[in-house]
Amino acid sequence: MPTPPDPHIPALLLAAAVRLGWRVVTHDPSGVELGELVEDGRTRHLIVVAGSTPGTVEWALVGEVPRGFAAHLLTSATHAALRAGKPESLGALWISGAHVAELSSERAA
């Protein structure tokens, strides 16, 4: 799967992130914890979908990952930034066999 071009963070995602928890799933090669969003003990998957205009993409939060999509993990710092409502763009990375989403202001791949 190619890295999406600077996906947009919709306001709805920021509003939803406030109520979501986060749990560790794995670690990247440097030891940074990578995790998933949770709500009432259930995983909420972060995926990239087609945007409202041709050639654009944005992040979406789903209960089940649709066929042909991959869920992205988050660092704890990215989860905290989403909960704080930071509007910076997320970027998609491939680390240690996992799709990872990080705010653009955070560490590079």
Image: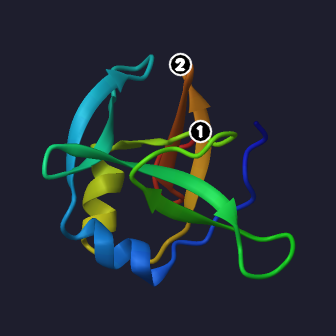
Q: Quadrant of the C terminus?
A: top right
User: What's the residue type where badge 2 is placed?
Assistant: Ser
In the image, residue 40 above or below residue 108 = below
| Residue 88 % position (x, y) | 49, 72
Q: Quadrant of the N terminus?
A: top right
For the point 70% across and 40% down, the residue is 68
Count residues near mark 1 (Cα–Cα under 10 Å), then give few for <14, some for 14-19, many for 20+: some
Q: Secondary structure at mark 1?
A: loop
Label 2 vs 1, first from the N-terminus: 1
Mark number, residue 19: none
| Residue 32 % position (x, y) | 33, 29
In depth, the one of 5 and 50 nearer the eye is: 50
Report the coloring of the rendering.
Answer: rainbow
What's the CA distance linking mark 2 and mark 1? 15 Å
Q: Secondary structure at mark 2?
A: loop
Q: Are discs 2 and 1 less than 8 Å apart at CB?
A: no
Mark number, residue 70: 1
For the point 30% across and 72% down, the residue is 16
Mark number, residue 96: 2
Count residues near mark 2 (Cα–Cα under 10 Å), then give few for <14, some for 14-19, many for 20+: few
For the point 22% across and 59% down, the residue is 20
For the point 29% across and 66% down, the residue is 17
The reply to whether residue 74 is visible in this rendering is yes
Front position among marks 2 and 1: 1
The reply to whether residue 85 is visible in this rendering is no
| Residue 37 % position (x, y) | 30, 48
In depth, the one of 48 and 90 nearer the eye is: 48
In-image side of 105 versus 69 (left or right): left
| Residue 30 % position (x, y) | 40, 20
User: What's the residue type where badge 1 is placed?
Assistant: Ala
